[in-house]
Image (tube, grey):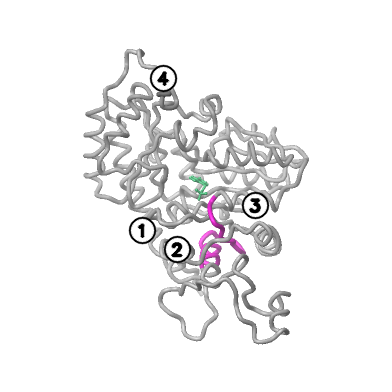
Amino acid sequence: MKQKGFNTKAIHDGKMNCEQESMSVPIYQTVAYKYSDAKEAAAIFAGQQHGYTYGRWDNPTVSVFEQRMASLEGTEAAIATSSGMSAIFLLCHQMLTAGDEIVSSNRVYGGTFALFEVGLKKMGIGVTWISNPESLDAWAKAITPKTKFLFVESPSNPSLFIADIPALAALAKSKNIPLVVDNTIATPALHQPIALGADIVVHSTTKYICGNASSLGGIICGPSAIIEDGIRMGPLRYLGPSMAPFNAWLNLNGLETLAIRMERHCQNAMAVAKYLEQHPKVASVNYPGLASNPYHAMLKVNKLKGASSLMSFEIKGTYDDAVCFIDSVETITHATHLGTCKSIVTHPASTTHSSLGEADMKKAGISPSLVRFSIGLEDEADIIADIEQALASTPQHKDGKKADVYFPPAE
Ligand SMILES: Cc1ncc(COP(=O)(O)O)c(C=O)c1O
């Protein structure tokens, strides 16, 4: 049979074992399941018979979401988790022991940076940060016999770095180690890293996949040996960051419209980026959809259907100008989130990325006057009108008299 298209898979894939299927996947709001007898319970636990054991490691609603995600990312299996961070942590816990190392791009979400820099190091695992992740040579030089995987977030939050995934995957293969890609920002609707040679994909489903800021969630998509035999039988059971059935249901609903939402996210974001690029109060715009962006060529290399809707821009001026702009928006929501129908503005230096500290923020290209947008699905003209009025009320401290601080000054 002909391979189904993305939208068909996103709406139909994943099966539940019941006599007559309902149109909406039922929410199995339960922790445990009845067995007909002891023999059946033993067979289900031994994996010799299909069935569910206990809510921490399997649930019918969550299972449909896992199957659908595996189908969309093109992996053998997937495991849903309580958040994006718990997905990355579970994967690390499965793949690493004290004395091992990983090599990671330094353009990662602040929580991931903290997990690797603080959490993994605390467990005796070494992390080599690649501060020029465009350089394949830098990655190659950082790999040692102790390296257990390469990690890249592409496109990255908030610096919008886009990796050359096929080249990184080839490097990882030549060293016999997996390449892990955080595909939160593009989602499988815009590109599938596995088809480009990556081995494992992680997501914060909290973002575009759920799509309306209603549930935390994460997922790891990869080979059965790691996902089912490894994580589900191991750390998912003894650590327990499972996805709640209701959250899986919200994510299944999100998947049904993901591709069409991503298309509109990309269209609206491109219009905003073009508007900002010509604005006299804007020093620079970082959106890979723009031909002027250094990572624009990577869209083609990675077969990205669009540049998603995350972007950042530097206001001419200082911290004060950035926060004045943020405090002036009306339609756009000021929040530390991204990937929802609502457009969102964030000040990364004082919020999402503050845990990095000034030195690491500088290395990752996060300045006090950087403003991040996640462009939503409102009418393009209304988003632009809101940006226009907020920029009009932004003073611009060009004289340098104001301190260029990263955080709100102490009272
Ligand atoms: C790229 C990326 N990965 C992972 C995470 C962590 O996800 P969660 O907030 O669901 O734990 C985030 C959160 O913003 C993110 O942007």
Measuring from the top left, give residue 74's x and y in whole percent: 56, 61
The earlier-in-sequence mark between 1 and 4 is 1
Between the residue at mark 3 and the residue at mark 4, the CA separation in whole angstroms equals 38 Å
Q: Residue at x 26, y 27 (%)?
A: 394
The reply to whether the C-beta atoms of the residues labelled 3 and 1 are less than 8 Å apart is no
Q: Are marks 2 and 1 in contact (CB under 8 Å)?
A: no
* Residue at the spot of label 3: 91
Q: Is disc 2 placed on a helix, strand or loop?
A: helix
Identify the element where label 1 is drawn.
helix
Q: Of the residues shown, which amino acid type is indicated by label 1? A: Ile
Task: Determine whether label 1 and label 4 are within 8 Å by CB.
Answer: no
Mark 1 lies within 8 Å of ligand 1 (Cβ measured): no
Point out the tag, 2 or 1, that comes first from the N-terminus: 2
- Mark 4 is on which residue type? Asp
Q: Residues within 10 Å of mark 3 (few under 14, many from 20)?
A: many
| Residue receiving disc 4 | 404
Viewer-nearest residue: 315 or 351: 351
Q: Do the residues under discs 2 and 4 have CB atoms within 8 angstroms?
A: no
Cα–Cα gap, marks 3 and 1: 30 Å
Q: Whole-Å distance between the Cαs marked 1 and 4?
A: 41 Å
Foreground mark, 2 or 3, reads 3
- Nearest to N terminus: mark 2 or mark 3: 2
The x and y percentages for residue 154 are: 52, 43
Q: Position of residue 177 (x, y in %)?
A: 71, 47
Task: Identify the residue position indicated by label 1 in the image.
Answer: 260
Q: CA distance from mark 2 to mark 1?
A: 10 Å
Which residues lie in the magenta part?
Answer: 65-84
Q: Nearer the viewer, mark 2 or mark 4?
A: 4
Determine whether label 3 and label 4 are within 8 Å by CB: no
